[in-house]
Each structure stands twice: as structure tokens, then as C-alpha cells.
Image: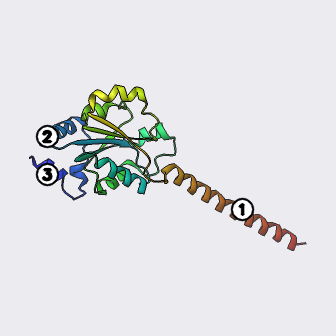
Amino acid sequence: MSTNIKKLLTVESNIKHRFIPDYKELAEIVVMLKSAGYRIVLTQGVYDLIHEGHAAYLEAAKAQGDVLLVGVDSDELTRKRKGPDRPIVPQEERLKMLVHLRHVDIVTLRELDHDIGLLIKTVKPDVLVVSHSTKDFTEKMVKEYKPFCKKIISLPPQATTTTSARIRNLAIGGAEKLANEIEKMTRDFIEKIRSTK
């Protein structure tokens, strides 16, 4: 087994060895892993504000095989899919956070110009894991990508927490705090005007 593969499969979270942005190199490593008898699991997503649902989802995905490869949406791709205020956490930090999770073996980036199926076609995983909440993975797409995967599994959400809900709660909390501050300032201002009569 090559040194690179040994470094991929250690418990260390060394992003230098586990982040593989070049799809040609990634394909070569996947071929080596498969020839060594490893079952490759692929999943993709944003992984913004990583929470327990992400960790449980990745653990469930890893249980489907031996090596878990995670395609992470770049900042540009995330903005296109989720809106101009996303991601909250930049891609470099999201990649580093993922390699710290013990179930994640390899990470790569999905760029804006990548077709949704490019990583699937490149890796040809033994198991493709998608989330029930993935809106852009339709039945038509399952048929399209089935020839590149031995198995496609759709997992339900692994927690009630979602990144969007957390962001909404933060925004609501901030708005409520601002409203309270404005109300206090208004009361103080009115009181000051009354006291100057």
C-alpha cells in the first residue's frame, strides 16, 4: 500500500494528506483503495456550522463501507445554492473541521463549475449516501448516477438540528436584542425630553 494511502487512513486529522482537491489524483487514490479491498462511500454537502446532525449523518454514512469521502461545496457553490449570506463558515475551515471528525477519511471540494454528478462519476463509489433533505437529488438523478454506484442510500436527518434553523434562531435573537435596545433608547429619549420641561 502506498505511503499516501497509509497517511489517509491514520487517525491523524492532517488536512495536507486528507484534502484532495485534484479530481485526477482523487480518482487514482480511489482506484488504489478499491484494489486494496476497501469499500468507498461518497457523500456531498455544505457542512456549514457543523452540528451533531452532521456528525451522526457522517457516522451513519461511514457505516456503509470502509472509507468515507466527503465532497464539500465551495463557498461559491454554496452561495449559488443557499443564497448570498451563506456559507457562514468559509470552505477552508469547513474542510478542516470535517477532517477532525473520526468518520471522515478524505475531503474534496465541489466547485461552482462542477456538474452535480462530476464527483460521483469521478469516484464511482461503492455506496453513494444522500440525505432525504437533498432537494437536488431527484429520482431522475438516481437513475442517471446509478450506473456509477453499486448502491445508493438515502438517509433521514440524524438530528432535529439544522444549520438553517440555527441561523434563523441567531437572526431572530439578534433582531429581538436590537428591538429591545431601540425600545430602551426611545424610552430614555422620551424621558429626557419630559424632564427638560
* Left/right of residue 23 with respect to residue 158 in the rendered view: left
Q: Earlier in the sequence, mark 2 or mark 1?
A: 2
Residue 183 percent coordinates (x, y): 74, 63
- Identify the residue shown where x is 19% and y is 50%: 8
Helix or strand or loop: what does disc 1 sit on? helix
* Position of 196 relative to 162 (above/below): below
Residue 51 percent coordinates (x, y): 43, 56
Q: Earlier in the sequence, mark 3 or mark 1?
A: 3
* Left/right of residue 140 with respect to residue 122 in the rendered view: right
Front disc: 3 or 1: 3
* Position of 82 relative to 101 (above/below): above
Residue 186 percent coordinates (x, y): 77, 64
Tag 1 residue = 182
- Identify the residue shown where x is 14% and y is 48%: 4
Helix or strand or loop: what does disc 3 sit on? helix
Q: Earlier in the sequence, mark 3 or mark 2?
A: 3
Tag 3 residue = 6
C-alpha separation, residue under disc 3 versus residue under disc 1: 58 Å
C-alpha separation, residue under disc 3 versus residue under disc 2: 11 Å
Residue 122 falls in image quadrant: top left
Residue 16 percent coordinates (x, y): 22, 51
**Tag 2: amino acid:** Met
Front disc: 2 or 1: 2
**Tag 1: amino acid:** Ile
Badge 3 crowding class, 10 Å Cα cut-off, few under 14, some 14 to 19, many 20 or more, is: few
| Foreground residue among 6 and 146 | 146
| Foreground residue among 56 and 167 | 56
Residue 130 falls in image quadrant: top left
* Left/right of residue 10 with respect to residue 161 in the rendered view: left
